[in-house]
Structure formats: C-alpha cells, structure tokens
C-alpha cells in the first residue's frame, strides 16, 4: 500500500488535486482527456512495405499513433534485434503517408538526438524502467516519454522512475501498465488491472494499458483491453501484425488487422459506457 508519507517521495508525479490531470499531446490529440487514444503497430519493424501496410490499416481503424520496434531488447542474443536507424526511417515515411505519430523504444542514451529526429514519443521499455542513466538522458528530449512499468516492480518504484523524468524537466510523461511477472505460467504476464485505478488515484499522469504484453496471447487481448478501459485507462498500446505467424518477434500476442478492427469496435462500446469516446 502506498501511504501519504511514502508518496511524498515522488513529489512531482503524485496527484495534488482530485481533478487536475496532465494531458500529453500526441499529434492533434491529448492523452488524458476524455477521449481514449489507441497506439497500434507491430512489435518489430520488419520492412518498409510491412510498416506502411500496417500504418494505413490501423489509421483507418481509428489509431492515433503507430508503434514499432527499431532497436529491440531481446532475452536471447540470437533473437532478431531490429533494423535500427533504417527502421526509424521507414516509420517516418509511414508517418508522412498517414499522419500517425510514431512511438518507438529507445535503449541507448546516445541515440536521443536520432530519436528526436524520427520519433514523436520515446518509449522506455519495462527492462529499462530503472535504468536511471537512460531516464535522465531521455528526459532531455523535447518529445513525450512513454514509460512502461517493470515486470517485477511495485507501483511506488514505478512512480519514482517517472519522478526521474519529471525532475529532469520533461513533464510529458505517459505511464503504461503492461503486466507483471507472477507464478502464473498460462499467460506471458499477469495484467495488473488494479494498477490502473491505483495510478490514477496516486498520480496526475495519463495511463496507458498494454494488453498485448499483459497477456502474451492474442486470444485474450480484446477482453483485457475492454477491462482496462472500464478501469479508467486513458488509452491502449496494442501489437498488430499483417501476418502474425511470420512475425520476427511476438507474433503470438499480435492481433491481425481484422482482429484489431474488431477490438476498436469493442473499445468504442466500453468507452461510451463509461462516458468517454475513442
């Protein structure tokens, strides 16, 4: 439990008034307002054609931003590590065609200038949530920062990680619940739906939900996405692939384009039920 005394350790991230929230701009939208924003795209950018095809599809379905991994942190050194700068260029070209904002994960502090040239939202992945040197470097970016919760971190530790970004002067911080590691092995992670209302109560920062990593199985993504919106999430981060069976990473948790379109229809219904829109 986060007590008032302990919450004072994250002075900038903590909520100070019930109805004063931080809204983070993503293109022409603001994350944290009444409208639910959806960020979608493949785990890894695999080719120029692939990312353009997916970008056009998710834009048509209602997404406001395109996610895609250019530099990939992988558990195995033998797994696909991403196409790097070339992938960022491909995503930028997709942005020119669709108008979607670009979201991609950064792992190297030295790459902040490059990411600022290509990316609209810099993502810090769960493995790097407490990489404090990276947090301080990325906070120097002029762009918003999407900070994912570590797979084994408490909410207090998570908000203190956000505090590093805020303390360095970047106020455009987005939180993202992506599931935690528990004893359960049926799913890749256990999606902590408790974290959404808890973070909204403790902090003024907007909160995204990542049902793809939260479950690790595409069959459960839609259900968890519905639950996250009902619980108060300000948006979703969803993995979408045109051919998940051939994906170079995380195909088992990626929605096909038709399934993503179905998800968007379901999310709109849940959003309406809780007096929000998509």
Image (cartoon, helix red, strand yellow):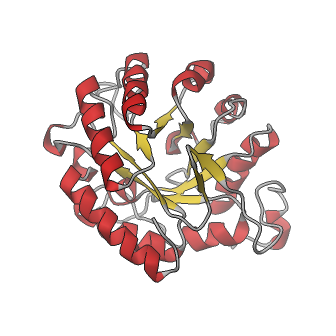
Residue in the picture at 37% in, 31% down: 97
Q: Quadrant of residue 142?
A: top right
Residue 186 in view (yes/no): no
Given residues 127 and 251, the one toward you in this image is 251
Is 10 placed above or below 263 here? Answer: above
User: Whole-percent x and y of residue 32?
Assistant: 62, 61
Position of residue 2 in the picture relative to residue 228 (left or right): right
**Numbered marks: total:** 0
Q: Position of residue 43 (x, y in %)?
A: 34, 40
**Residue 105: image location, x then y, percent:** 49, 35
Q: Nearer the viewer, residue 52 or 145?
A: 52
In screen coordinates, is 224 left or right of 115? left
Report the residue at 74% width, 46% height from top: 171
Residue found 56% across the figure and 68% down from its top: 195
Q: 134 above or below 20? A: above
Report whether 107 appears left or right of 6: left
Q: Is residue 141 visible?
A: yes
Q: Quadrant of the N terminus?
A: bottom right
- Which image quadrant: the C terminus? bottom left
Q: Residue 113: x percent and y percent? A: 62, 19
Q: Is residue 213 left or right of residue 256?
A: right
Q: Residue at x 79, y 37 (%)?
A: 168
Given residues 59 and 149, the one toward you in this image is 59
């Amino acid at each position: 439990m986060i007590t008032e005394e302990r919450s004072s350790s994250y002075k900038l991230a903590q909520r100070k008034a019930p109805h004063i929230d931080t809204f983070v701009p993503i293109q022409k939208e603001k994350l944290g307002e009444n409208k639910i924003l959806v960020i979608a795209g493949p785990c890894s950018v695999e080719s120029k054609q692939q990312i353009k095809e997916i970008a056009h599809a998710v834009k048509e379905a209602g997404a406001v931003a395109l996610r895609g991994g250019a530099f990939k942190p992988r558990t195995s050194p033998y797994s696909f590590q991403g196409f790097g700068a070339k992938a960022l260029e491909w995503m930028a070209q997709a942005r020119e065609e669709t108008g979607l904002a670009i979201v991609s994960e950064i792992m190297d502090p030295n790459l902040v200038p490059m990411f600022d040239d290509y990316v609209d939202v810099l993502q810090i992945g769960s493995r790097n949530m407490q990489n404090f040197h990276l947090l301080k470097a990325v906070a120097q970016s002029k762009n918003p920062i999407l900070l994912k919760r570590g797979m084994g971190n408490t909410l207090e530790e998570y908000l203190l990680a956000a505090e590093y970004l805020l303390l360095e002067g970047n106020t455009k911080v987005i939180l993202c619940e992506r599931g935690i590691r528990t004893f359960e092995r049926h799913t890749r992670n256990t999606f902590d739906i408790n974290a959404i209302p808890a973070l909204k109560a403790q902090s003024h920062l907007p909160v995204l939900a990542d049902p793809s990593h939260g479950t690790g199985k595409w069959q459960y993504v839609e259900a968890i996405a519905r639950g996250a919106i009902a619980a108060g999430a300000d948006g979703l981060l969803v993995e979408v692939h045109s051919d998940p069976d051939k994906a170079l990473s995380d195909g088992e948790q990626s929605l096909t384009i038709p399934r993503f379109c179905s998800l968007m229809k379901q999310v709109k219904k849940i959003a309406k039920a809780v007096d929000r829109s998509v």
